[in-house]
Amino acid sequence: MRLLFCGSGWLPIVDQIAARLPDGATITAWDRRAPLASVIAAIDVLLPSNAAITPDVIAAATQLRLIQQPAAGTEHIDRASAAARDIPICNAPGANHVVGIAFGRHRDGEPPHGDEPREIVD
């Protein structure tokens, strides 16, 4: 199984995912100097992050079985092209909820974690 991370940030996550993959599975980060459609043919799982997943990219991804967005948003993924190829799109909507709770607690003057006293800096 081959995974491709397409984000321009969060690059340490590539090593964290690699450490948890089963034997024989690999993950690489997309080198943005090359067009995404030119490097995606042999990829099984795509982690788009902030990359635009266009109809051309999906058409070039001949082995693609899953688009797993490591964040909440999927608006830059061509859902119709993925659906036409029966490629599921998954995301992580809980990430936005966690950040919202943290902001809310900070705004209300609550400690950011549990009941531990911490200095709140504005």
Image (cartoon, rainbow, N blue to C red):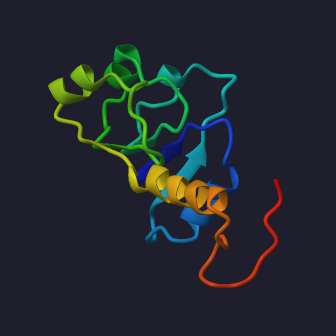
Quarter of image, res 22: bottom left
Residue 32 spot, x, y in % from top left: 66, 27
| Residue 48 or residue 110, whichever sits in front | 110
Residue sitting at x 41%, y 40%: 43
| Residue 73, horizontal then vertical, whole percent | 43, 36
Residue that sits furthest to the top in the current view: 56
In the rendered image, the vertical position of residue 81 relative to residue 45, given as above or below: above
In the image, what residue occupies the spot 18% across and 29% down? 83
Outermost residue toward the front in this view: 108
Which quarter shows the N terminus?
Answer: bottom left
Using the image as rendered, state which of residue 62 and residue 17 is in the foreground: 17
Q: How many marks?
A: 0
Which residue is situated farthest in the bottom direction here? 116
Horizontally, residue 82 falls left or right of residue 103, namely: left
Q: Is residue 46 above or below residue 104?
A: above
Query: Compared to 119, does 73 lie above or below?
Result: above
- In front: 59, or 16? 16
Q: Residue at x 83, y 60 (%)?
A: 121
Q: Is residue 5 left or right of residue 11?
A: left
Q: Position of residue 37 (x, y in %)?
A: 47, 21
User: What residue is at 52 percent from the left and 29 percent from the top?
Assistant: 39
Q: Residue 85 at what x, y percent from top left?
A: 19, 28
